[in-house]
Amino acid sequence: MKISKAWAETAIFIALYLSAIYLWTLPLQKSNMPYGEYDAISHVEVGDYMAVNDKSLVNLPHYIDFRYGTDNLYRPHTLWYHPPYHTDFAIIQIIAGERVVPIYIMNAIFSTAILVSVYFVIRALFGFLPAILSALLLVFSPRDFLPFLWGQWPERLSYAFVPLILYCFYKYYLSYAEGNEKPVYLYLTAILFAIDIYIHPLVAFHSIFGLIVLFAFLFFKERKIPFNFKHMISCILIVIVMLAIFPYQTGNVFVRFALEETESKAKDFSRLFHWSPNPEDFKGSVPEAYFSFREMNGLWTLPFLLLGIFFLAFRRERRDLFLLAWLVSLYLVLHRDLLGKATFLHRSLSATAHIFAPLTAIGAVYISSFIKIKPLRDYLKYAIVALFVILAISINGKNIEMLKGAYQGLSRINQVQYEASLWVMENVPVAYNVSVVGVPDQLYKQLPWMAIFSQRLNRHFESFTAEEARQHLLNDYIFVDYTNSILLNDPARIKSLQEFESAALENFTLLYNKNNIRIYKYPQK
Amino acid sequence: MKLDNKLFAGIVLILIAAFFFIVFGMAGLRLALGVFAIFILPVYLILNNFDLTSEEKLIFSFFLGIGIFPSIVYLLGLVISFRIGIIITFILMILIGFALKKYKQKK
């Protein structure tokens, strides 16, 4: 039985891709409870709401509106993201038949989609070896899996569209330049671009810069402008129609962009000589290591990266211009703070590996091309590729420890809290809030996580003033949670909760009492 | 014997489904099959009518599928059951694929 070379290459890539899925879902394999920062909570709750309630979400329900009611600047209290991303979650939740696990697997598929798009584009333009080595580096890229862990999910998927959008435009340009115009690529550029806006407008901004620089580079080389009035109009119409389908969210994109303040602080033009923004500007919100080339890419990749850039700049074939344009456009986007537009600059930095990885791989694979003797050239090429793989796995592979240890223990809700939240969803009328007693301040995030599954607003009882506490005791369902105190082995907190129950909830009706969680309601007259 | 393309694709699909089942259980298996059936297959049948390489069709099917399919489901979900919206969208996109094929053949 013979397997063609193309299929063998595909099989290798699929094995690598499944390895990435396995590694990136390690936090999920250790516990099937949800994890992530506040961004993750918002993404799970929107998708979950649609699947559980069997309807699309336009106006935000109370428990989501409480935190995100003003995020849509054009139409407050409505969904602030374009719907497709979260609708995908809802669809897959329904298909897979569970509430938590499918969303997290789908998110891993979305967040690793960058491997697929980079592999596809680099293989099409430069062949298998640079493509598979690029994908290998991306498996271990912390600038990709850290935001994935934190919850900046749509952005991860959106970045996977950038190389595809550039690729389609590139293919159209070349087909036009060669007199064999293929408008299907231009239409695909337009549709992919509109979907990119749906998923994350910031990244669509990257695509626009990429298209402009790629156009400029190709024009410089080909001296032709691909302009077909009919095709251009069709493309513009495609984008307009696709954006008009979701007017509230598209309106939000434009209003947000218009209102974004231009920073007036003094510009640091020495930034032009640095790739990354200054970590000092993000102290407290993003770890310093995130801005370090050594920590994120491995210092060993630097010579290959520089070699790759020099090689492409020296050769300047059409396909070389493709990658160089992508690199230059990312440089421009990363320095937009010099024009006063610094919002989410660190998030743009997360796109670095997507272009650095292929440049590094090309640098490694093409070193041997300087040698003219064929057998020696091939031996050297495969020796360097083998070294590349060993270094990538042994050095960059250590980054996987960050995934292994992510969000363990009390940083997630536990199974008991999850079950109690399901009870709340089934038994507490929609008009009522739930006041949660017993969750320590530092574990406050458990409240919005539980709110996803109860679909009721959770309030942190211990944060109330005396008057607020009195009001909430009378009006809310009171959720007394001993689970954290038991897991923390905190007898003082357990005693205090017991005293609270006997003193404040004496005349209340106990509605739920299971696994150290009790839910009460003050009897209504 | 040379391995047939369709056979190879079938084996790959089974292996991927097996991976998701082993690692994530039944939810993983259903998800893997769902991603293929819902997000890839309908758009692939549409793109199959255009002058694109097999790899392009496959890759673009996924990336277009996760944008177009949910958009239609979401709009339907505003007026009918979300679940029924998924079924209608699936049928609609499959029909568009076959209609395009017929149209291209006639042309």
Image (cartoon, coloured by chain):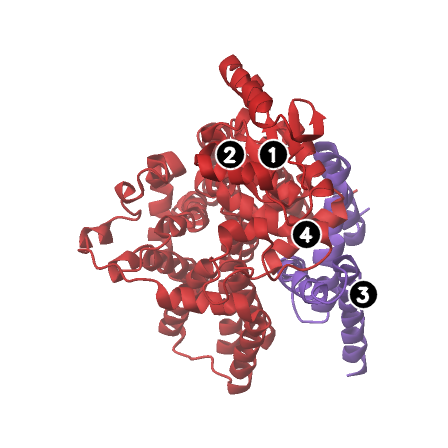
Chain colours: A red, B purple
Spatial CA distance of label 2 from label 3 is 49 Å
Q: Which mark is residue A119?
A: none
Does residue A426 appear to the left or right of A469 in the view shown? Answer: right
Question: How many circles with numbers are drawn on the protein?
Answer: 4
Q: Amino acid at mark 2?
A: Phe
Chain on which label 4 sits: A
Spatial CA distance of label 1 from label 2 is 9 Å
Say which element carries label 1. Answer: strand
Say which element carries label 4. Answer: helix
Disc 1 designates what residue? Answer: A478
Spatial CA distance of label 1 from label 3 is 47 Å
Image coordinates of residue A123 in percent, x first then y, are 55, 53
Q: Amino acid at mark 3?
A: Ile
Disc 4 designates what residue? Answer: A90
Chain on which label 1 sits: A
Does residue A380 appear to the left or right of A314 in the view shown? Answer: right
Quadrant the N terminus of chain A occupies: top right
Q: Are marks 4 and 1 on the same chain?
A: yes
Disc 2 designates what residue? Answer: A461
Say which element carries label 2. Answer: helix
Quadrant the C terminus of chain A occupies: top right
- Is residue A139 shown to the viewer in this render? no
Disc 3 designates what residue? Answer: B91
- Tell me what residue is drawn at x 20 percent, y 56 percent: A265
